[in-house]
Every structure is written in C-alpha cells, then in structure tokens.
Image (cartoon, rainbow, N blue to C red):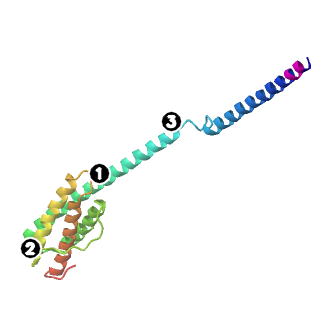
Amino acid sequence: MLMHGFLTSLAFRLFRHSAVFVTLLAAAAAVVSAQASPPSSLSRTDEPDPMASIEEGMRVKRALRYAEKEYRENVDRAHELAKLGTQLSESFQKNQELDHEDWKKLERLERLAKAIRNAAGGSRSERELDDRPSDFAGTVKKILEIVESLAERVEKTPRHVISAAVIDQANVLLELIRAARELSPKGQA
C-alpha cells in the first residue's frame, strides 16, 4: 500500500507537471502565432483607402486637364505662327523687303518658335544650317517654308508625344531668323 501511495503521488505529480508543460507549450505557440500575424487593423492591405483613391483620382484629372490645356496652347501658337507667316509672305511678295511691322512679326515668330520648341520638350540649342541661304530674299522664303511646315507638324503631333521633328523645325526656324537679321539690307534687327 505504501508503494501504491507512492506511485499514485508520483503519477499525480507527473500529470500535474505535464499539464503545466502542455499549458506552457500552448502559451508559447499562441505568443509566436500572435507575433507572426499583424493585428487585424494592419492586415487589411488589400482594401484601398477610399480617401487616398479619391485624392489620386483628382490628381490624375488635374494632370490631364493641365496637359490638355498645354497642348491646346501649343496648337494655338502654331495657328498664330501660320497666320504671321502668311502675313509676312504677302508683305514680302508685295514689297520685296520687310518693313518695321514685318520685323515685329518676325520677332513674334521667334518667340512662338521658342515656346513651341519648349512645349515639345526641346531646349536651347544652337544649330548650324547645312543649306543656309546666302541672300536675304532666299532666307525669308526659307523662313516662310519652315513656318508652314512647323505649324502643320505641331497640329498633327498628338499631345502625349514628344516630337523630335517639331523641335528640329523650331531650331531651324530660329537659326533662319538669326540669319535674316544678319543679311538684312537695312540692318534691321
């Protein structure tokens, strides 16, 4: 009986220790599991924040409106460029020279060409012409050809395209305007 009491006591202690061990093991597993998964408030990364998506949508719409406005302004510049080119052509054919008002139009052409070049993604660039006309009349005629070509290219270029051809034509026009100032018979600039 003594032995039976001893064994019962031993079994009871083992059972109690194994219950404590199992409890500790379960608690440790719970702690590890809790550390591995983020809290439920942080685990909702698959659901977008409605305010962030609204703000992003507004930002995109603003950017699109701005791009469309810039494109329209550049097309308007091209229309003005073509109009001034036509006026200069008529005046030059009539007088075979440029008067004071024509020089002002030529200066406006220069500003428009720079604005068109910048809007197309170009920058200041000195360009030496391969076939630069040697006389004033030839230079003016070449300017008028380039004005017409540049205006057409700007109108045909979609707003989301950077056109190297537009940039190149604008640079050629600017160089021809400089040449016209140098070759002017009256020294007007």
The amino acid at mark 3 is: Asp
Q: Position of residue 1 (x, y in %)?
A: 91, 17
Q: How many marks?
A: 3
Check whether the beta carbons of the residues at disc 2 and disc 1 lie within 8 A of each other.
no
| Disc 1 target residue | 160
The amino acid at mark 1 is: His
* Label 2 SS: helix
Mark 3 or mark 2: which is in front?
A: 3
- The residue at 39%/49% (across/down) is 63
* Label 1 SS: loop
Q: Position of residue 112 (x, y in %)?
A: 26, 64
Q: Is residue 141 magenta?
A: no
Residue 84 falls in image quadrant: bottom left
As drawn, 111 above or below 156:
below
Dot 2, crowdedness within 10 Å: few (<14), some or many (≥20)? Answer: few
Dot 1, crowdedness within 10 Å: few (<14), some or many (≥20)? Answer: few
| Disc 2 target residue | 138
Check whether the beta carbons of the residues at disc 3 and disc 2 lie within 8 A of each other.
no
Q: Position of residue 169 (x, y in %)?
A: 19, 64
Q: Is residue 5 magenta?
A: yes
Q: Position of residue 179 (x, y in %)?
A: 17, 77
The amino acid at mark 2 is: Gly
Residue 46 marker = 3
- The residue at 75%/31% (across/down) is 21
For marks 2 and 1, give the CA distance.
35 Å
In this orientation, which residue lies closer to the viewer: 122 or 11?
A: 11
As drawn, 14 above or below 99:
above
Residue 30 falls in image quadrant: top right
Quadrant for the C terminus in the image:
bottom left
Magenta segment boundaries in residue numbering: 3-7
Side of 89 relative to 48 (left or right): left
